[in-house]
Image (cartoon, rainbow, N blue to C red):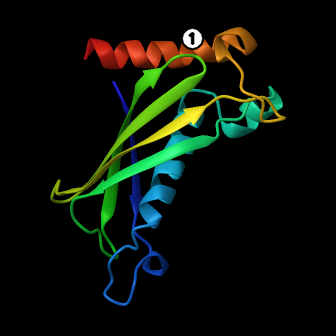
């Protein structure tokens, strides 16, 4: 089971033709991740209070169709991979009204302490690690 996030395209995110600039989709992924972490009681603030950061190591996007001003984007996301040290999140963005596919993509992350030193979340914060493991198991069971 994944997480679903919705957001409406703002005028300032578009170009002269009313089309969303390609760089904004990466921002949408980050917004969705932040909302998702809040939904599982691990908002960025709580992670940082526990000396945990989740930097992005890589982003991959396959643009399928353009979103335009006024569209509502539905972002479905799942944990594709989780090792305790690294995590891959997969995204699918569609138009809420038509279900037209805008984008597929993924982000790759690692876990670090507040000094950006890589950590094993399983050792550093086992309660947080279990949440990610449960999400991965739920996706695998689907």
Residue 6: x and y, percent? 39, 52
The residue tagged 1 is: 130
Q: Is residue 19 left or right of residue 24?
A: left
Residues 60 and 98: in front is 60
Q: Element under label 1? A: helix
Q: Which residue is drawn at 28% across and 12% down?
A: 141
Vertical side of 64 occupied by 18: above or below: below
Q: In this view, does 123 lie to the left or right of 141?
A: right
Residues 77 and 10: in front is 77
Vertical side of 105 occupied by 128: above or below: above
Tell me the quadrant of the picture where the N terminus can be found: top left
Residue 126: x and y, percent? 67, 9
Vertical side of 98 occupied by 16: above or below: below
Tell me the quadrant of the picture where the C terminus can be found: top left
Q: Residue at x 49, y 13 (%)?
A: 133
Q: Residue at x 46, y 75 (%)?
A: 13
Q: Is residue 43 left or right of residue 82?
A: right
Residue 97: x and y, percent? 20, 59
């Amino acid at each position: 089971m994944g997480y679903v996030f919705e957001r409406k395209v703002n005028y300032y995110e578009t170009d002269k033709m009313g089309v969303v600039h390609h760089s904004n989709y990466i921002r949408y992924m980050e917004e969705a991740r932040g909302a998702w972490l809040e939904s599982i009681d691990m908002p960025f603030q709580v992670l940082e209070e526990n000396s945990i950061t989740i930097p992005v190591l890589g982003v991959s996007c396959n643009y399928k169709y353009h979103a335009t001003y006024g569209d509502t984007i539905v972002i479905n996301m799942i944990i594709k991979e989780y090792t305790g040290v690294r995590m891959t999140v997969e995204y699918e963005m569609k138009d809420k009204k038509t279900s037209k596919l805008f984008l597929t993509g993924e982000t790759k992350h690692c876990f670090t302490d507040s000094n950006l030193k890589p950590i094993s979340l399983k050792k550093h914060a086992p309660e947080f690690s279990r949440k990610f493991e449960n999400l991965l198991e739920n996706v695998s069971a689907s």
